[in-house]
Amino acid sequence: MGVIVLGLMLLSLTIWLGLLCFRGQFWRVDQQLEIGETQLKSLPVVCAVVPARNEADLISTSLRSLLLQDYPGSFNVFLVDDRSTDRTANFAEGVAHAVGRPQQLHIISGESLPPGWSGKLWAVEQGIKSASLFAPDYFLLTDADIEHDPGNLRRLVAKAVQENLDLVSVMVRLRCESFWEKLLIPAFVFFFQKLYPFRWVNNPNNPTAAAAGGSILIAREALERIGGIQVIRQALIDDCALAQAVKKSGGVVGDKGTSPMPSQGRIWLGLSTLTCSLRPYDSLATIWDMVARSAYTELNYSPLLLLGTLVAMPLIYLVPPMGVIVGLVWSNWAIALTGLLGWLLMAFAYYPTIRFYKCSPWLAFSLPAIAFLYTLMTLDSALRHWQGRGGAWKGRVYPNPGNL
C-alpha cells in the first residue's frame, strides 16, 4: 500500500514540475497591459459597444469611466439596452449629461432575440451595426459592469497599433473584497491562466487563443475578416471563441531563407491592475453559479473530458496534502516529504496570483481545498447541462449551443 501511495505522490510531483517548466509559465503575472510604452503615434477612430441588461446598479459607474477616457482620438460609446426592466437606459442617459458628454453616448433599444443567438452577442451585433456608421478602426467590446481606468483605452490602442495586433484583451481585476472572493476569485484567474497560458496566447506561432470579455479591443478589419460577430453567435464563452476565430484567420508569410512572420491574426491577452470589475461575488452561491454556468462548456460538453477532469484535479491538487497527512500518520517520511514538496510547488505557483490580488500569503497553501470546490462546480455544471439548465444568465437559459 505504501508503494502505491508513494507512486501517486511522485506522479503528482512530476505533474507539478511539468506544469511549472513546460506550461508557458502560466503561473507568472508578468503579462500586464500597464507594462510598456503608451505613446500614440496615430489616433484611430474607436467605438465602444456595451451590451446592458438590467445593469441599473452598476451602469452609472461603468459608463462614467468609459465616457471620461483620456483617449485624444475620436471615441463614441454605443450602449445596447437589452430589454432591461430597471431603467438602465435612463441611468445611462443621465450619466452622459452629468459628465458633459451626451454627444458621445448612443443608446440603442435592443430588438427581440432571434433564434440561433445568445442574448449578449445579439446585443453586441446590434451595437456593432450602429457603430459601423462611424467607420471605426477599432471596436472596444466591454461589459456594463467594468470600471475602466482613465487610460485604459489609450493603452489598448497603443498596444494594438505599436505591435500590429488584431485583438488586444485584458482580464480586468476582479472584485476581491469579501471572504469568498478572497478565497476563490484569485484561483479563478489562476485556473484560467493554466488553461490558456497568456504567453502561448500572445505567441502568434502557438494555436492557443483566448480573451477576456470585459475589455476587448478588436480591429474592424479583423472582425470583418472572420465574418463578424455572427460566426460566434451561439458561443457561451464568447470571448475565447472570438479570440480563436481571429487567431485562426491569420496566415504565415515569409521569403525563402527568412523566418516566417504572421501576416494577420495576432492577438494579445494580459492582466490589468487598474481596470476592474464591479460585479460583487459576496457568497459561495454567486461564485458557484458563475463557474457552473460555463465550466462544462470549457470541456466541450464531453463526458470523457469531464471524467478526466474529475480524476486529474484530485491527483494534481489533493494528493500532495493528503500525502503529508498519510505520511505523518504512517511515519513514512518518504511519502510525507514527497507530498510536502508537491504542496510547496503548488503554493509557489499560486503565490504570484495571490500577491497580485493582495491577499494573505497563507492562502497560497489553500489551493487544494479551493480546487476541490472548483471540481464540484464543474461536476454541477455538467449536471445542469444534462438537466437542461446549463448556461443560465440574465434570465435566459441556453441548455445546448446547438439549440440556441
Image: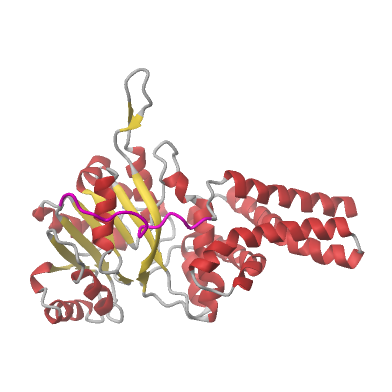
Asked whether residue 404 appears in the rendered view, the answer is no
* Residue at point 16%, 50% (across, down): 42
Q: Nearer the viewer, residue 124 or 353?
A: 353
* Residue at point 84%, 57% (across, down): 335
> Magenta-highlighted stretch: main secondary structure?
loop
Q: In which quarter of the view is residue 328 placed? A: bottom right
- The image shows residue 145, relative to residue 253, as above or below, that is below
Disc tally is: 0
* Residue at point 43%, 56% (across, down): 400
Residue 34 falls inside the magenta stretch: yes
Check the image and tell me how it is coloured.
secondary structure
Residue at the farthest top position: 256
Q: Position of residue 87 (x, y in %)?
A: 22, 81
Image quadrant holding the C terminus, namely bottom left
Q: Nearer the viewer, residue 96 or 84?
A: 96
Asked whether residue 73 appears in the rendered view, the answer is yes
Q: Nearer the viewer, residue 89 or 23?
A: 23
Q: Which residues are magenta?
A: 28-42
Q: Position of residue 380 (x, y in %)?
A: 57, 65
Residue 100 falls inside the magenta stretch: no
Q: Nearer the viewer, residue 119 or 290?
A: 290
Is residue 198 shown left or right of residue 327?
left
Q: Position of residue 214 (x, y in %)?
A: 34, 63
Q: In which quarter of the view is residue 55 placed? A: bottom left
Q: Position of residue 83 (x, y in %)?
A: 23, 72
Image quadrant holding the N terminus, namely bottom right
* Residue at point 23%, 73% (across, down): 63
